[in-house]
């Protein structure tokens, strides 16, 4: 047994090297099928020693060179591990198969030789159904461990027959589960992007990117497998009953929040450390991050071959179920990614950010900004990788009974995929002591990579552990024998929300390249007022302040009308608060707008016509605690020292609701968060 443990360790070193340095493609080129010969009777881990090396090699060569396209990768892993788990069920005191009910074998037959033979025949049948064009690889896989791929026996008294029946049943039962395997995984939802790769028509929606395929050859991204939203889950729940709150900061009408989340991405981009870069790459490679962390766990738990396959099935099932709901909501919101939003907000203005591989931090035009990792081929919100990590971690917490992980992965100097030869600048080891550490790093790694806003990560972190729980509970019902035999999977009915949205008349969308300058009708209204509009067609009219004598604290006003579908910014050149008088109803009404400071002016964002008025701010009660920001840009955080959720410009005056010796909890842009006491001036009431 010792020599097989050494083979396993040698293989894992190869997997780490190939998976991390080349994204998986070298793995496919470096593992000829006869390189490792194993005796199936003695193999301690046929899943990782026999099946996954071949599967990952083909995935890297045919499907996802970076091993980052989780939806298809995970379905292959789910069905293969399902076949292996169902094949092992007859050799367990109580376990039953999900899609097959094979009679239990006598206890004297519960040997690793029989279990491994059954599991490998199960995996072989699943792989032949999933990727038949690679049958030569799967046939060699069987021969390499002394098994006959031409033995198609269905005799349920033998390990070969049990594996063949379980594998074919698992594959066939998922053939019409909603992912459209029989249609080569083409979209069945009718999704069409609002934006093109060349024109941002709606700055709230996902924009497909251009991918360079070779010298002068480019392809346009397509939303990868949007029909995953219609896939039947493994656990027993209704995906349509699970919804995520909308990404309000990704709507341009919430301009301050829209700009702030873009600014947070830029600040992060400008301050990338080697550790942040390596974690971004690690969690982008789902095989390295989720696969190797699980292998570490199996070694710590000293699992049997069958239990290794069972834990693997559990974790990939949790990830798959999480992806179904995440893709449902991605399809629903179709949200913009940071690269498009940054270009929209700043155009060709210079911004400070990471300048590209080996370029470090420098000033570049905003419309040339690039994320540290390539933008994924699907909408931004919520974060699929974050959701999968939380589901994976929770399933394995339940499986192992602890949050402890104690997993490390080492990077020699210069082994970065994005910055080879440069990053890291010294040998570096990433360590995750707990699954909680693992999930937090996984989520933030997507932000460090530049492909997600923080809100998308936090949204996924808030709800995705539940998929680990539901997967574990269903897994337990398979293990204790209480699960009913599942009927072949069927695609879910189309999302009712999506169907209702498509029945509504399409809105007229007119979005210019960038914010228009002050409309001509507003240029000479009053030097004290400036207006910048997103739509053209906005008009301004001066207001005779003597006609507003009933409003004793009014300082200035302007009437805004015209096309305000995407809003306008109104600024007055003196301090105060801004209100709007709306007169589109029977009774005119006032309401206060959210005011903010820009270079000494008091500004507000409007998205409907009316009279915009600057009012003298009422005196603050002496006991109220207020702070004024003194840094050019101050981080606005979810918790003291925690995630950055916005940036606050210098001179903002903010009410304090709570404080610690070094931090203030304040209200800003309609949100509550924390700012450092080192960069503010506090009022006497504090």
Image: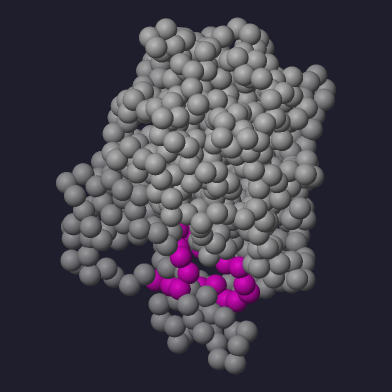
Would residue 85 be found to the left or right of residue 3 on screen? right
Q: Position of residue 539 (x, y in %)?
A: 70, 69
Residue 630 lies, in percent from the top left, at 33, 44
The residue closer to the viewer here, 524 or 566, is 566
- Please name whichever residue, 387 or 605, is drawn nearer the observer in this view of the structure: 387
| Residue 254 in view in this figure | no
Extreme-bottom residue of the structure: 586
Q: Is residue 441 left or right of residue 490?
A: left
Q: How is the image coloured?
A: one colour
Give the answer, above or below, for where 18 lies relative to 236: above
Quadrant of the image occupied by residue 147? top right
> How many numbered callouts?
0
Prevailing secondary structure of the magenta residues: strand
Quadrant of the rendered image containing residue 586: bottom right
At x 32% / y 28%, what residue is drawn? Answer: 301
- Residue at 78% x, 20% y: name it: 214
Question: From which residue to which does the magenta span run?
Answer: 592-616
Q: Position of residue 306 (x, y in %)?
A: 45, 31
Residue furthest toward the right?
216
Q: Is residue 220 visible?
A: yes
Quadrant where the C terminus is found in the figure: bottom left
* Residue 611 falls within the magenta-colored stretch: yes
Residue at (58%, 15%) from the top-left corner?
Answer: 145
In the displayed structure, 241 sits above or below 661; it is below
Is 181 placed above or below 51 here?
Answer: below
Name the image quarter holding the N terminus: top left
User: Which x, y percent locates residue 436?
Assistant: 34, 39
676 part of magenta stretch: no
């Amino acid at each position: 047994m010792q020599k097989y443990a050494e083979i396993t360790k040698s293989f894992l070193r190869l997997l780490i090297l190939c998976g991390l340095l080349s994204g998986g493609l070298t793995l496919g080129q470096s593992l000829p099928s006869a390189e490792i010969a194993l005796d199936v009777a003695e193999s301690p881990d046929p899943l990782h020693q026999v099946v996954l090396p071949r599967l990952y090699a083909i995935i890297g060569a045919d499907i996802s060179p970076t091993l980052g396209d989780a939806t298809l990768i995970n379905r292959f892993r789910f069905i293969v591990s399902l076949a292996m788990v169902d094949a092992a069920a007859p050799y367990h005191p109580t376990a039953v198969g999900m899609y097959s009910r094979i009679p239990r074998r006598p206890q004297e037959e519960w040997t690793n030789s029989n279990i491994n033979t059954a599991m490998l025949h199960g995996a072989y049948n699943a792989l032949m159904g999933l990727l038949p064009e690679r049958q030569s690889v799967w046939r060699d896989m069987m021969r390499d461990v002394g098994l006959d791929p031409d033995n198609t026996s269905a005799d349920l008294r033998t390990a070969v027959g049990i594996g063949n029946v379980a594998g074919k049943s698992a594959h066939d039962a998922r053939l019409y589960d909603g992912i459209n395997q029989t249609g080569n995984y083409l979209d069945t939802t009718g999704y069409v992007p609002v934006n093109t790769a060349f024109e941002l028509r709606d700055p709230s929606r996902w924009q497909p990117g251009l991918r360079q395929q070779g010298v002068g050859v480019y392809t346009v991204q397509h939303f990868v497998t949007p029909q995953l939203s219609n896939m039947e889950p493994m656990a027993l729940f209704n995906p349509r009953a699970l919804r995520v709150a909308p990404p309000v900061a990704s709507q341009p009408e919430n301009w301050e929040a829209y700009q702030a989340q873009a600014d947070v991405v830029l600040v992060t981009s400008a301050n990338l450390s080697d550790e942040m870069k390596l974690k971004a790459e690690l969690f982008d490679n789902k095989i390295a991050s989720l696969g190797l962390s699980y292998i570490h766990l199996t070694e710590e738990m000293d699992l049997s071959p069958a239990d290794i396959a069972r834990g693997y099935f559990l974790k990939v099932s949790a990830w798959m179920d999480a992806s179904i709901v995440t893709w449902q909501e991605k399809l629903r919101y179709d949200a913009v990614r940071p690269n498009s939003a940054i270009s929209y907000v700043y155009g060709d203005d210079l911004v400070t950010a990471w300048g590209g591989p080996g370029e470090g931090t420098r000033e570049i035009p905003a419309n040339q900004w690039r994320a540290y990792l390539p933008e994924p081929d699907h909408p931004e919100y919520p974060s699929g990788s974050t959701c999968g990590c939380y589901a994976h971690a929770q399933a394995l917490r339940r499986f192992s009974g602890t949050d402890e992980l104690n997993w490390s992965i080492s990077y020699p100097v210069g082994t970065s995929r994005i910055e080879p030869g440069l990053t890291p600048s010294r040998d570096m080891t990433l360590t995750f002591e707990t699954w909680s550490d693992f999930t937090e790093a996984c989520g933030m790694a997507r932000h460090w990579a530049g492909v997600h806003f923080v809100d998308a990560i936090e949204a996924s972190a808030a709800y995705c552990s539940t998929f680990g729980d539901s997967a574990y509970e269903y897994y337990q019902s398979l293990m204790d024998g209480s699960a009913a035999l599942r009927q072949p999977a069927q695609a879910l009915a189309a999302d009712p929300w999506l169907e209702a949205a498509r029945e509504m008349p399409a809105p007229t969308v007119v979005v210019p390249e960038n914010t228009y300058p002050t409309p001509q009708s507003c240029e000479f209204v009053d030097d004290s007022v400036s207006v910048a509009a997103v739509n053209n067609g906005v008009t301004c009219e001066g207001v005779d302040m003597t006609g507003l004598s009933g409003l004793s604290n009014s300082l200035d006003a302007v009437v805004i009308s015209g096309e305000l579908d995407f809003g306008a910014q109104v600024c007055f050149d003196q301090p105060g608060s801004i209100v709007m008088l709306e007169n589109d109803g029977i009774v005119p009404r006032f309401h206060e707008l959210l005011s903010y400071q820009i270079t000494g002016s008091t500004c507000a964002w409007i998205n409907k016509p009316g009279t915009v008025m600057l009012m003298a701010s009422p005196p603050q009660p002496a006991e109220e605690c207020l702070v004024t920001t003194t840094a050019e840009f101050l981080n606005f955080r979810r918790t003291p020292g925690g995630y950055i959720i916005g940036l606050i410009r210098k001179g903002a005056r903010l009410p304090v609701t709570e404080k610690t010796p070094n931090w203030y909890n304040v209200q800003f842009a309609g949100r509550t968060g924390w700012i450092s006491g080192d960069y503010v001036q506090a009022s006497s009431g504090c």
